Image: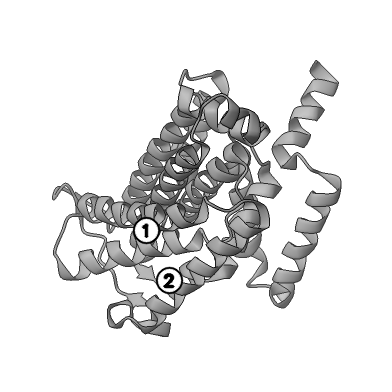
Amino acid sequence: MKLSKLHIALLLVALVAPFVLYPVFLAKILCFALFACAFNLLLGYVGLLSFGHAAFLGTGGYITGWLMMNANLTPELAILLGTAAAGLLGALYGKLAVKREGIYFAMVTLALAQLIFFVYLQAPFTGGEDGMQGIPRGELFGLIDLSDNLTMYYFVLAVFLFGFWLINRTIHSPFGQVLKAIRENEPRAVSLGYNVNDYKWVAFMISAALAGLAGATKSLVFQLASLTDVHWHMSGEVVLMTLVGGVGTVFGPLLGAGAIVTMQNYLSGGELGNYIHIIMGAIFVICVLAFRGGLVGELQKLVKRNFG
C-alpha cells in the first residue's frame, strides 16, 4: 500500500495527538477503530452482516487477560495467542455461518455469539459479571514498560497500523477482488468457478482474528476484560460505527469509531448520559435514511462538489 499525502498527514496527527488529548482515550478510539475496520472487511467488501462480532472481541480480551495474569507471558505473546484464539473461534463459527445468506447469516452469528456470551458468564476464569480485573500491562519484549499511558498509546497505534495495513492489503489483493465480486454478484462468481463459501470463510476468519486483536489490545489498555465486550450490544455498536463512518470505505470505520467513542465519552457523564442510547439510535436512523454513504461518503461528495 503506497502512502498518500492523506496517509502521511493522518499518521503525523496520530503521533502528535497524545500530547493534546488523553492517551488512554485515544488508545480506546484506536482499539474500536480496528474492531470496526475488521467488521467492515466482512460487511463492506463481502456483503455479510454479522451480528456476533463481539464474541471475537471478547475472546481476544479474555484469553489475553488470563495469559497475562496466570502464564507470566510478555504482552506481545499474550496478544498473539488471544488473537489466534479469536481466529480459531472465527474459523469454527464461520464454517457454520457462511452456509447461510442474508438475514439467516446474521441470525446464525447472533445465536453463536450469545452462546459464547453465556459460556463466558459461567466460566470460572472470566470472573463472571465482575469481569477479569487488574490485568497487568507487562513489559513489551521484556524491555518496554507499558504501564506508562503514553508508551501504551504508541504500542496500540503500532498494533492498529499493522491491522489497518493488513486489511488494506487484503482488500487490494486478488483475493480481495474476488470478495468484491461475491458482494456484487455471487451467482456470477460461482459461474466463474470460485468456491464462494471458502472465500467467505477465509474472510470471516481474518475479520474475527483482527477483531480479537482489537479486544486483546483493549484488555491491556483498560486492564480489564468484561462481559460488556461479548454482549450483543457491542455487536450492534460496531455496526453503528461502520454505518456512521461509511460502509465499504477505507477510512469510514476509523472515522465512525472516533465519532461514536467520543460521543459516548463526553455525553455519558453529563445530563444527556441517560439518553445516550436514544441519541445513538437517532443517529443510526438519520444515517440510514439520509446519509447512506456515511461521514466519508458525504465528505467525498462535498470535496467533489467544491473541488471536482
Question: Which amino acid lies under the numbered mark 2 shown in the image of this protein?
Answer: Ile
Q: Earlier in the sequence, mark 1 or mark 2?
A: 1
Name which residue lies at 32% across and 81% down.
Answer: 123
Contact between labelled residues 2 and 1, with CB atoms less than 8 Å apart: yes
Where is residue 49 shown, x and y percent of the image? 62, 52
Whether residue 252 appears in this view of the structure is yes
Where is residue 126 shown, x and y percent of the image? 33, 77
Name which residue lies at 36% across and 50% down.
Answer: 150
Name which residue lies at 60% across and 45% down.
Answer: 43
Whether residue 12 appears in this view of the structure is no
Where is residue 53 shown, x and y percent of the image? 51, 58
Question: Which amino acid lies under the numbered mark 1 shown in the image of this protein?
Answer: Leu
Label 1 environment density (alpha carbons within 10 Å; few <14, some 14–19, many ≥20)? many
Where is residue 240 shown, x and y percent of the image? 66, 55
Estimate the spatial distance between the alpha carbons at disc 1 and disc 2, rounded to whole Å.
10 Å
- Quadrant for the N terminus in the image: top left
Local SS, label 1: helix
Which numbered tag is attached to residue 116?
A: 2
Which numbered tag is attached to residue 89?
A: 1
Q: Is residue 248 above or below residue 213?
A: above
Judge by depth and name the residue closer to the eye, 139 or 161. Answer: 161
Label 2 environment density (alpha carbons within 10 Å; few <14, some 14–19, many ≥20)? some
Q: Answer left or right for 241 relative to 53.
A: right
- Quadrant for the C terminus in the image: top right
Q: Answer left or right for 98 relative to 95.
A: right
Judge by depth and name the residue closer to the eye, 280 or 176. Answer: 176
